[in-house]
Amino acid sequence: MSSFGDGTTVVDGHVTTVHSGGLSGKARFEEPFKPGPSKPSAANFSATVDYMEEDRQFFVKIEKDGLIAALQKLDRQLTNAGRGHVLSRKKPTDWIGKEVTPGQIGLINHGGLPKILTRPGRYPGMPLRNWWARKWQGTCGLSDTVIEFGGLTVVQVSQNQAAVVSDPQNHVFVVKNSGFVAYAIEGTYNVLSIVDQTHLPTMIKDRITGVVLGWSHEVTMKSRTGTGTKQDYVVALFLNIPANNCAILQKGDDLELLPAGQHFITSPNVTLRGLFTLGENQIEMPTKDIFTRDQVPVSLTIYLKWQLTEPLKLTTHGYNTPYDALRDKTQSILTQIVAHLDYSSMVKQRSLGPDNMDDGTDASSAFLDALRTRAMDDLHLAALEYGIIMKDLAVIDRQFKGDIASTMDKLTTRALQAQVEAANVDRENSNKIKQEEGALAVARIKAQSQNTKADSEAYSIVAAAEAQAKKLQIEAEAQAKATRLAAEAEAEAVRLRAAADAAVVDMFAREMELRRTEVQRVRAFGPKAVFVPTDGLGAQLGSSMAAGMAAGLGAQKAVESRRGAA
């Protein structure tokens, strides 16, 4: 795209779709906008005209070599035309004078004509003849966006900027991502504005849906009229159109679609018809009063969802927004359908939409189906004529008006109240049944819990008894085993002692052992104990004494028994 535009509409983006041939009658439309290669068209008024195509005197474009080279080229043009230099021939020093640092240029007023110092250094004020009729005006940066001095105009803009400039003939052009140096012999080059193209100040919204359609900025120029007063005139319009949006431009009876991007308009013959979004939109729309078949007025609130695909068709029919086109058509279609419905059938239906279907048994279901299907079909076909695709349609609310509606509303309200009361009674009964069922379930669970607890306790008792019996059995077995082992150990000890005693053959040793045994026996029973021998003569004597003692005791017992009997 060219960096200069003179009296044109510049489109930064793809080629736009053009509709030409007048706004009256049935016109032919192009296909919906699709980005593609550029195709020249006689009707396409969105073309770029380079301001540099014409030979303009003392006007030099700043190329890649920078501002100094452009000033030198302008100086040569002025010299060849017999005019004075704009570049001063003074040579700098390094000891005294006005200072020009690297990256700057010095400005000198030489009798009303501009002189430019391009070489860095110091410029002394001597000799005096060098500064006669000259005045130091300071310095400017080589990268400054705008420099205006003594008829010399320098403009340099970055990638995001656009400069709106008026030349000596009041032709307005725009400079983008470039710059120029110009010297006006008659008139001036006026820089009207430096525009930040990505941050335009004026936001444009859809007045119905509130969707942001884009941003704009108008550049004005003051002009003096015949009465001597100054008045502002719009000379350029900048547009920043976001993705999935577009604009419609008009030139006479021709319309053109402008795609998303950054654009500017300087041609006075081109006007902005409007901005549109190509995305989906939705809104709740109230309708005017519609009379049913029994002459009851009703006001509907409907839900609309649509998508604009061909804005040229919409603007050709004279509508500024898709809502304006759909509103009248929707009102007409709903009026025709509701006119065949009676009040009672509409009261039964709480909401009318694609998701609310009947089983076909109601006598009014045919009309309700017509409201769902026919209204959607008719509105879809009507919307296609305006380049709109209908996505959804539903009636979300209705308000009946008039005395009949008021009376029927009371009857309907009573019926609804009865239904609500019946529903409340059913709900209460259902709640009670559920409560009883819950209590029964709780009791059943408690019984199961108690049974489980009893089983657990019984099992614990049985297990404890078995454990105690097992314990006693183990202890008895252990005790018996211990006794058996002790007896075996004692028998073994006796056997060993007997074997040891039998092994003694010395008579003296045996006698000594007998004496020690006797000592131990006396020690055990005491010194007063009498030991009776159990063998020989002593044994027989002991037996006789025992028999005598027994006979004496028996006779004593017999005497006592006879005395007791007497």
Image (tube, rainbow, N blue to C red):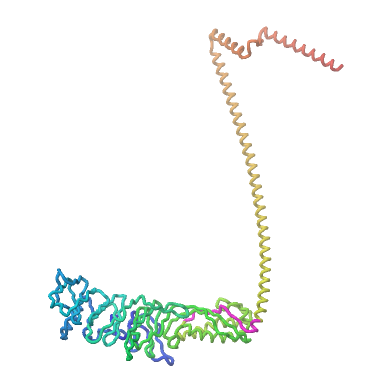
| Side of 290 relative to 268 (left or right) | right
Residue 28: image x %, image y %? Answer: 41, 89
Q: Quadrant location of residue 265?
A: bottom left
Secondary structure mostly seen in magenta is strand
Q: Quadrant of the N terminus?
A: bottom left
> Is residue 39 visible in the rendered structure shown here?
no
Q: Residue at x 55, y 14 (%)?
A: 501
Asked if residue 403 lies in the magenta stretch, the reply is yes
Q: Residue at x 56, y 76 (%)?
A: 355
Residue 116: image x %, image y %? Answer: 19, 77
Looking at the image, residue 457 lies above or below residue 199: above
Residue 95: image x %, image y %? Answer: 14, 68
Considering depth in this image, is 179 or 474 the residue closer to the camera?
A: 179
| Side of 357 relative to 130 (left or right) | right
Considering depth in this image, is 549 or 87 the residue closer to the camera?
A: 87
Q: How many marks?
A: 0
Residue 12: image x %, image y %? Answer: 33, 80
Asked if residue 110 lies in the magenta stretch, the reply is no
Q: Residue at x 61, y 35 (%)?
A: 471
Where does the magenta region start and end? 389-406
> Is residue 32 visible in the rendered structure shown here?
yes
Considering depth in this image, is 201 or 557 the residue closer to the camera?
A: 201
Q: Quadrant location of residue 357?
A: bottom right
| Side of 88 relative to 508 (left or right) | left
Q: Quadrant location of residue 35?
A: bottom left
Name, please, the residue furthest toward the right: 566
Looking at the image, residue 142 lies above or below residue 48: above
